[in-house]
Amino acid sequence: MNIKSFRIFDNDLDQSAINVYLSSNAIAVDTETMGLIPRRDRLCLVQICNEDEYISLVRVERGIESAPYLKQLMEATHVTKVFHYARFDVGILKYQLGINTSPIFCTKIASKLARTYTDKHGLREVVKELTQVDLDKSAQSSDWGNIQNLSEHQLQYATNDVRYLLAISKTLTQMLKREERYDLAIKCFDHIPTIVELDLLGYDNVFRH
């Protein structure tokens, strides 16, 4: 799993990169942050990959509140954005950069609906079963805030987190359709922006009795 070619951008994509991604039917997206609470922990890195493994890493400096090219791409209705646990990534993109991501495919939700024979739905477990690649997740809990000096290990981790998402989304789609749960998955994906809005407003499971 050596690092393949990728481009690093500061604070936003450029015109050439967004043109590549806008020509895709789907792209894989992930984020790295200083923690798991959007209202406290800032966005540090956005990773994007298409089917040709054209990978971009966007370093986001403290205080950046908008990224016009990223916003255009994330809101493009003809490009599906594939995440693993979209609820968090979509939330941090909305909170910090004002991006309303759509349409969405979440491989974690898809895995829970399709792979009901297991309770292991983390990215590493799903990728290992469906692609036979064992991801190294040891850089997950590391300092992503030092964006100008990210280590080779962190860069490899960041690129690998998007490299396999499109492949597993295709396999999960096949499984969902086979088990007649694909329409249910789409309804779940469509509901993610509402859940994100509730999260950012501080609500805790309004569906609980």
Image (spheres, helix red, strand yellow):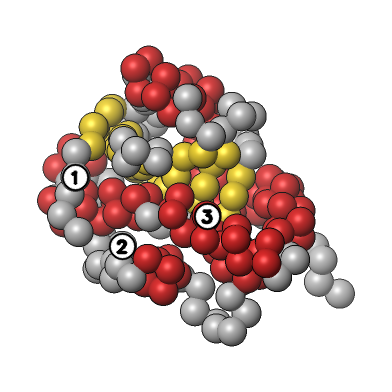
184 vs 41, left or right, is right
Residue type indicated by callout 3: Lys
Residue 8 in the image: x percent, y percent? 24, 32
Residue 188 in view in this figure: no
102 vs 128, left or right, is right
Picture quadrant where residue 78 is located:
top right
Residue 56 in the image: x percent, y percent? 31, 35
Q: Which residue is mark 3?
A: 170
The answer to whether the residues at label 2 and label 3 have Cβ atoms under 8 Å apart is: no
Residue type indicated by callout 2: Gln
- Which residue is depicted at the point 40% across and 41% down? 51
Q: Mark on residue 4?
A: 1
Q: Quadrant of the N terminus?
A: bottom left
Picture quadrant where residue 98 is located:
top right
Label located before the other in sequence (2 or 3): 2
Q: CA distance from mark 3 to mark 1?
A: 22 Å
Label located before the other in sequence (2 or 1): 1
